[in-house]
Amino acid sequence: MVEVKEDRIKEIIAEKLDIGIEQVTDGAKFIDDLGADSLDVVELIMTLEDEFEIEITDEDAEKIVTVRNAIDFIKSL
């Protein structure tokens, strides 16, 4: 597995959602705070899977609603 770096996760989120890195705070919700729609979230999950060589099930993906959720989930694998 690839080493997980929080800054890299935040960079990916900012790139995929076309927002400034300063907006990507731990408590930010992808849809409510960062302007993502459901398709954006699916694409973000797929990008994270590729970047960190992991698989995120649909059930787990539904639980990833904030930046911190994504970081903690990836680090838990």
Image (cartoon, rainbow, N blue to C red):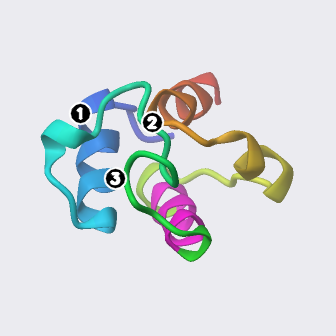
Is label 2 in a helix, a strand or a loop?
A: helix
Q: Amino acid at mark 2?
A: Val
Q: Nearer the viewer, residue 10 or 22?
A: 22
The disc label shown at residue 13, or none: 3
Residue 42 belongs to magenta span = yes
Question: Whole-Å distance between the Cαs marked 2 and 1?
Answer: 11 Å
Asked whether, in this view, residue 1 is left or right of residue 13, the answer is: right
Residue at horizontal 85 percent and vertical 50 percent from the top? 59
N-terminal of the two: label 3 or label 1?
Answer: 1
Residue labelled with disc 2? 67
Q: Amino acid at mark 1?
A: Asp
Residue 68 belongs to magenta span = no
- Residue 11's spot in the image, x, y percent? 23, 48
Asked whether, in this view, residue 51 is left or right of residue 58, the answer is: left
Residue at horizontal 16 percent and vertical 44 percent from the top? 21
Asked whether, in this view, residue 12 is left or right of residue 66, the answer is: left
Asked whether, in this view, residue 61 is left or right of residue 66, the answer is: right
N-terminal of the two: label 2 or label 3?
Answer: 3
Residue at horizontal 45 percent and vertical 36 percent from the top? 67
Q: What is the magenta range?
A: 40-49
- Residue 37's spot in the image, x, y percent? 53, 69
The disc label shown at residue 73, or none: none
What secondary structure is the magenta-colored segment mainly?
A: helix
Q: Are marks 3 and 1 in contact (CB under 8 Å)?
A: no
Question: Whole-Å distance between the Cαs marked 2 and 3?
Answer: 8 Å
Q: Quarter-wise, where is residue 64 in the image? A: top right
- Residue 19's spot in the image, x, y percent? 20, 58
Quarter of the image that includes the C terminus: top right
Q: Amino acid at mark 3?
A: Ile
Vertical placement of residue 12 versus 10, above or below? below
Q: Nearer the viewer, residue 33 or 13?
A: 33
